[in-house]
Amino acid sequence: MEIVEALAQLDVTNDAHWTGDGLPKVDVVASLVDNDKLTRAMIVDAAPEFNRSLANAEQPPAPIEPEVEAPVGLTPLEQCEAKIAELQDEVNDISKEVETLDNKRKILQRQVHILSGQADRLRPRDAGQQNITAYLAGQHKITQDRAAVRRQLQESGVAALLNKSTVAPIDAAMKQRKPARGTVRPTRPA
């Protein structure tokens, strides 16, 4: 038998097969492999991460078998059929409870929906309209202030001076330059 097969045969519930750290005991594995010269290093080489918790995870859980109570005078088949009928009645009862709870859930969801609609209708809607109106009034005041400043500039004559020299000196110099070749398109005489 190989080391890995021996490790698979260790009983997770038997403390005699494991060390305090959760590692397999060398002497137990050595007896399963039938090798008296087995060392911890050889076990680690065969299965580097093997420990008690990993062995517990690899073992499938034991199947749950329903207990069959034996009423007096019934054959094993009749006993199983009686137990099946009993379990089916229990399943039916649980199904009825689930259906009842589902109906309650639907009723409560309907009530939540109705109350949400009522709450929406009771909330004041003009609060949003008041904010919009206040914003528009503020924008109108800003526009009026700009118009007043523009009128003052025109009345003082500063606006006329600003309109005359709207071209920056660098732009005026660039306009007087001769255009580069191919940048001026010919025009057709009319």
Image (spheres, rainbow, N blue to C red):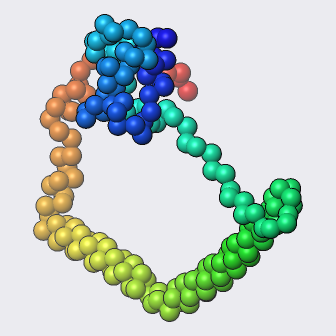
Near-viewer residue (96 or 167) = 96
Drawn side of residue 48 relative to residue 74, left or right? left
Rendered location of residue 168, percent (x, y): 17, 39
Considering only vertical position in the picture, is 54 above or below 115? above
Q: Where, by quadrant of the figure, is residue 106 drawn?
A: bottom right
List x then y, in percent, for residue 73: 85, 66
49 w.r.t. 85: above or below: above
Residue 117's spot in the image, x, y percent?
58, 85
Residue under the point 39% across and 12% down: 46
Can residue 180 be seen at all in this image of the molecule? no
Residue that appears at 21% across and 33% down: 171
Left or right of 32, for residue 137: left
Q: What residue is drawn where x is 12% and y is 68%?
A: 156
Task: Please state the horizontal and vertical placement of residue 138, each as a whole percent of the image.
Answer: 29, 77
Q: Quadrant of the C terminus?
A: top right
Instruction: Judge left or right: residue 190 versus residue 47.
Output: right
